[in-house]
Image: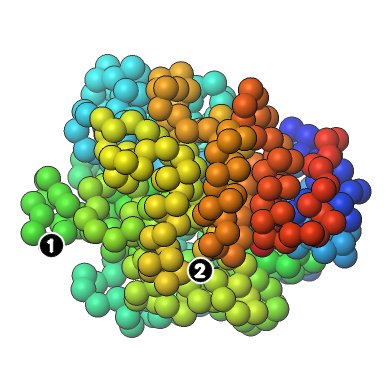
Amino acid sequence: MGLYAADGLKRLQALAANADSIPITRLWLAFVSPNMIYKAGSKTLAGAGFGIPTTSADAGFADVAAAVKTLEASGVEVFVSMGGWNYNCFPYMYARYSVGGYGTHTPNYWKIQKYGGGSVDGCTRENQYCWTCEPESEHTSLDLSFGIFPEPGNSSGWKAAQQFVEASAGSPAVEWHSEFLAGQSITDTKTGAQVKVPGSGAFAQQGRDPYQDLVFLAKDLGASGVDIDYEEFWHADYFKTTGKGGKPTTGPWELHQTVYKYAAIVKDVVDAITKNAPKMKLSTAAGAVGAWSGKWWGGNMKGVWLQVKQKYPELISFMSTGANAGGINVMTYDLSSNTEYHECPSDDACQLDKQVAFYMDTYKSAGIAANVGYEIGTPAYPGKDHDAAHQLPLTKEKLATIASSTQGSVGGGFFWSMYKPASGDQASSTQVAQAICEKVLPGNKRCKGTIPEPRLVSILV
């Protein structure tokens, strides 16, 4: 989901028209591609990956910039976000090593049973690798809809980030994989299969660094900040190593290589900000289990932000405290109450509000200042057509509970996504925004405002 699907531009303009009263103080434009191209001063979104439905020569740049200017002038900070689920998902790798990498009794293995005949070998290009990244109903394209975060090996900025990461990595040593280049084929060393990496590799052909170009784009748009939404589950599961005392095939494992890659991405962006836009802010979307210590049994990104804090504390500090802090925004949603797969942090913490409190407490224990996340409408996980009984939607009751308890102990809150529909007893985007606003900015006139109609991500801090 992203801002510029369908009528997103019109909704952005509607928000700008009501910028003085909408109940938010920060807005994320989501998502640009991690394979994006933007040359400073070019003022075109043609290579950004937003996909704005426009025939304008600048691919919508002027329209977006005008809306950003109005929002910023009215006290709403605008961030440009890179990533999002689809731009993190490598269908072949995700199906084989995340969904199908831990036996048959795992939460999403039903997709392999349904579309692959019970075997991951039945997950092919024809069925988009058992529709593990997105359901068939989304009408996605393997070549156009997905992507990965690259390692732009020819960039001086990326090389400097690599050196920074290697200096504090310790054991195991860092392994870099610049061969995973969008549009090119790679060899799966575990099976010998040749697989095409999703996305466009045009940035490499032009000698660009997407992480630096993200900063150039935000600066030219007049935005306050940039955001890294990194969710490469496939990378953690494919490049995992054996944990202390674990057996290679049974776990537990370690995801050090993903910690290193994420840290290098953030460092590249930090350096680009420092050099080209020193007042710009940087935020990141962080996994709910991202600060939870302990053994990792695969299938998520448990402990990644905790380990970055331990090895590269200056990166976490840049994003969470000080002048450049855009926030560590914890995605405490898309949670499940299915105890069959050990999806609750404890037997007595399966309800949404209890899970949110648990995960936010792990960030507090790790010394990471973080913001709590809310999701509008029906959760994306677990699948509504397969396990709706264990979904944990944000109801009006749970909103009130989380806002009155957990929200009061953290700096801010954010929600995904502004124009996602809510139904029944689910809390609407306006209700969520108002509840967070009243808790974080009590008495502020914005807290009475509403979200205008003509998909955005928004955050209030």
Q: Which mark is residue 369?
A: 2
Q: Nearer the viewer, residue 227 or 65?
A: 227
State the residue at coordinates (51%, 68%): 369
Q: Is residue 230 above or below residue 109?
A: below
Query: Which amino acid lies under the numbered mark 2 shown in the image of this protein?
Result: Ala
Q: Residues within 10 Å of mark 1 (few under 14, many from 20)?
A: few
Q: Position of residue 91 (x, y in %)?
A: 41, 37
Q: Is residue 60 above or below residue 337?
A: below
Query: Which amino acid lies under the numbered mark 1 shown in the image of this protein?
Result: Lys
Q: Which residue is mark 1?
A: 244
State the residue at coordinates (55%, 39%): 398
State the residue at coordinates (33%, 54%): 302
Whether residue 428 is visible here, answered yes or no, is yes
Could you tell me how far apart the alpha carbons at marks 2 and 1 are, in whole angstroms?
29 Å
Q: Does dot 1 land on a helix, a strand or a loop?
A: strand
Q: Nearer the viewer, residue 192 or 238?
A: 238
148 with respect to 377 (left or right):
left
